[in-house]
Image: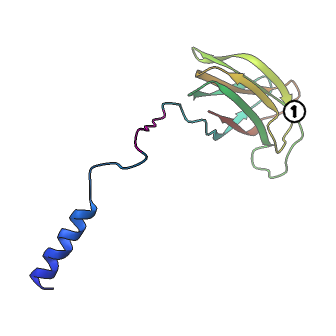
């Protein structure tokens, strides 16, 4: 490449770069609202008779949280179980979850427990609904803001 061509190319590229922002005169727009795109999270819980566990999450803005029991299986087996498990939503306290809303659910394809929550730290609880005879692995999906 010749030096003249290179200098011309640099000058043209430099002219295309401008720090100013053009747009309709007299208007300005900025957005300070939080994103309302829901997040989907998945987790698995191994629970036995009389047991429960929980998963904490942060709700960035007030909104609905939908929980779905995706599957319940026995460890080492592939066949799905229809045994209900207890799903709850609440607030973590110490090493537990204080549940405020719950339902006994079997696996499904859509949200089975939907609750409006304020922004903050919350938890999804998964536990025995009183019908487990052995350990199961529950796969849970939940969507939140």
> Image quarter for residue 91?
top right
Quadrant the C terminus occupies: top right
Residue 117 lies, in percent from the top left, at: 67, 22
In the image as oriented, which residue stretches furthest toward the front? 25
Q: Is residue 8 left or right of residue 105?
A: left
Any magenta on residue 130? Answer: no
Q: Secondary structure at mark 1?
A: loop
Location of residue 136 with respect to 116 vertically, above or below: below
Crowdedness of circle 1 by 10 Å Cα count: few (<14), some, many (20+)? Answer: some
> Image quarter for residue 87?
top right
Residue 43 lies, in percent from the top left, at: 66, 39
Assign the magenta stretch its main secondary structure.
loop
Over which residues does the magenta segment extend? 25-31
Any magenta on residue 27? Answer: yes
Using the rendered image of the protein, determine whether residue 136 is visible from the camera's viewpoint: no
Q: Nearer the viewer, residue 43 or 29?
A: 29
At 53% across and 31% down in the image, what residue appears?
33
Using the rendered image of the protein, determine whether residue 8 is visible from the camera's viewpoint: yes
Residue 88 lies, in percent from the top left, at: 75, 24
Q: In the rendered image, which residue does mark 1 sit on? A: 84
């Amino acid at each position: 490449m010749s030096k003249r061509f290179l200098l011309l190319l640099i000058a043209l590229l430099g002219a295309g770069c401008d720090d100013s922002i053009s747009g309709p005169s007299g208007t300005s727009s900025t957005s300070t609202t939080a994103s309302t795109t829901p997040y989907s999270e998945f987790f698995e819980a191994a629970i036995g008779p009389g047991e429960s566990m929980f998963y904490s999450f942060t709700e960035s803005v007030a909104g609905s949280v939908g929980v779905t029991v995706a599957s319940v299986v026995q460890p080492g087996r592939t066949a799905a179980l229809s045994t209900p498990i207890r799903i709850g939503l609440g607030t973590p306290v110490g090493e537990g979850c204080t549940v405020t809303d719950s339902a006994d659910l079997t696996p499904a394809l859509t949200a089975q427990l939907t609750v409006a929550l304020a922004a903050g730290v919350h938890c999804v609880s998964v536990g025995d609904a009183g019908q487990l005879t052995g350990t199961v692995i529950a796969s849970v999906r939940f969507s939140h803001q």
